[in-house]
Amino acid sequence: MIAARRLAASEITSPLGRTSPLIKLAVAIAWLVGLAFVVDPRPPLVLAGVVVAAGLTLGRVAPRRLLAALAPLWLAAAGIAVFGAVFGAANADPSAAVAVHLGPVRITDPALAGALALGARVIAIGAIGAVFGLTTDPTHLVDSLVQQGRLPERFAYGALAAYGAIPRFAADLLTLRQARRIRGLRGGWHPRLLVGLLVLAIRHADRMALAMDARGFGIGPRSRFRVVRWGWIDAAVAVGAAVVLIAALATAR
């Protein structure tokens, strides 16, 4: 069952939890852009280690919860690295130095270096995304984008409403499968379930749009239930993230 995750009280009151989501989003984008200009595996590994440590200490994320979020991403990174090393184009170069030679498998140094760099980037991207998601409340993120990032309210809160409706798809799928079983049909996967899900999604979207229009979303100035303000912690996180990025990039050859 898909469910929207709620932040724990310790995560909300943590330094990262109290940091402006717009600052955290800008830091994540800056780090990912910085990683795009390096081919050495050390900078992404440094950033991954820093962000995991920050999530455990500054974000107060439970180690088990963080591990559960990182495990599938890092497993995918390992698979990508192995695939890149075995099937890298550099393995076809007869003049390249051979790092591993097992029967018909020939892995050269350039292919191995490229695969390690790619896997390290995926590890860093997974760590940054996991810690950002585990320390950022979706409603707080949208409030920050609207008030601090000047994003249009109709688009921002509409996206938030669509995100909140995602768990409903799992419930709709379960209902459709039960309805098929009652009719004596297979309750497993069937292409017709997609049609039913599409119809239900359109109905939910129509009701949601009517409810938002009835509450005046996007019409004239609105009061704020939660005012998002800049603070010293935002400046500290931004400066610290810039220093960490520069130090990580300096480790590249």
Image (cartoon, rainbow, N blue to C red):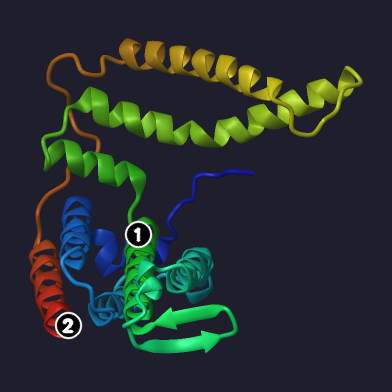
The tag on residue 129 is 1
Kindly identify the residue that appears in the image at 41 percent across and 89 percent down. Answer: 99
Does residue 224 show up?
Answer: yes
How far apart in space, not on screen, are marks 2 and 1 (Cα)? Answer: 22 Å
**Mark 1 secondary-structure assignment:** helix
- State the image coordinates of residue 10 (x, y, percent, origin top left): 39, 66
Name the kind of residue labelled 1 in the image: Gly
Does residue 60 show up?
Answer: no
Left or right: 27, with 183 as reference point: left
Q: How many marks?
A: 2
Kindly identify the residue that appears in the image at 49 percent across and 64 percent down. Answer: 76
Kindly identify the residue that appears in the image at 11 percent across and 35 percent down. Answer: 150
- Mark found first going from the N terminus, 2 or 1: 1
Q: Which residue, given by chain and number where applicable, does mark 2 sit on?
A: 252
Name the kind of residue labelled 2 in the image: Ala
The tag on residue 160 is none
Q: Is residue 237 above or below residue 173?
A: below
- State the image coordinates of residue 115 (x, y, percent, origin top left): 38, 73
Quarter of the figure with residue 11: bottom left
Quarter of the figure with residue 96: bottom left
Give 248 or 140, whichever is nearer the viewer.
248
Q: Is residue 222 above or below residue 4?
A: above
**Mark 2 secondary-structure assignment:** loop
Which tag is nearer the camera, tag 2 or tag 1? Answer: 2
Left or right: 111, with 226 as reference point: right
In which quadrant is the N terminus drawn? top right
In which quadrant is the C terminus drawn? bottom left
